[in-house]
Amino acid sequence: EELEERVEGRLAAKAADDEERLSSVAKTVTKEKKAGLERMMAMERTVRDLLGKQEDGEEALVKLIQQGNEEFTELVARGRREQTEREGRLREQLQEALAKIRGYTRDMEEQLDRERLGLEEVVRMEIRSRMS
């Protein structure tokens, strides 16, 4: 029972740690998205300046917007990939921890069964010796 409490405590600590990691990942992705938006806004200001100075401003605008959209799309895609990869690694770690716990539990049950069988044999021998 004490082992189970320790295991549960470790699992709870591990879950809290994993939750903190996921939160950190989400913050990182949000920062990257914000940086991408800021870049897009800066590009938009640049585009506006170019339109006032260039006759072919429309083409420049389209090109810069496409470039900004591509950068933003790549940032979002990269953030999603990284988050998915991190979540996958965390799932693997949790599964490994659970597998270890199951193994410890199985080993403990087997040990208890062996001890029980040994005690039963001692009781049988004691009964036989008293009956003789």
Image (cartoon, rainbow, N blue to C red):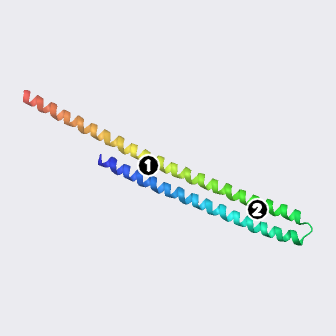
Hey, which quadrant is residue 121 in on the image?
Answer: top left
Query: In the image, 37: left or right of 57?
Result: left
User: Percent from the top left, x then y, of residue 85?
Assistant: 59, 53
**Image height check: is 28 above or below 52?**
above
User: Percent from the top left, x then y, of residue 11?
Assistant: 41, 51
**Image height check: is 92 above or below 125?**
below
Circle 2 residues within 10 Å: few <14, some 14–19, many ≥20: many
Query: In the image, 15: left or right of 66?
Result: left
Three-letter amino acid code of the residue under disc 2:
Gly
Three-letter amino acid code of the residue under disc 1:
Ala
Residue located farthest toward the top when viewing the structure as drawn: 131
Look at mark 1 in the image and give the residue it sits on.
97
Q: CA distance from mark 2 to mark 1?
A: 43 Å
Front residue of 37 and 17: 37
Question: What residue is shown at x 27% (from left), y 40% (from top)?
Answer: 112
Query: In the image, 65: left or right of 90?
Result: right
Q: Quadrant of the C terminus?
A: top left
**Image height check: is 51 above or below 130?**
below
Q: Quadrant of the N terminus?
A: top left
Q: Nearer the viewer, mark 2 or mark 1?
A: 2
Front residue of 108 and 11: 11
Quick one: SS at disc 1? helix
Quick one: SS at disc 2? helix
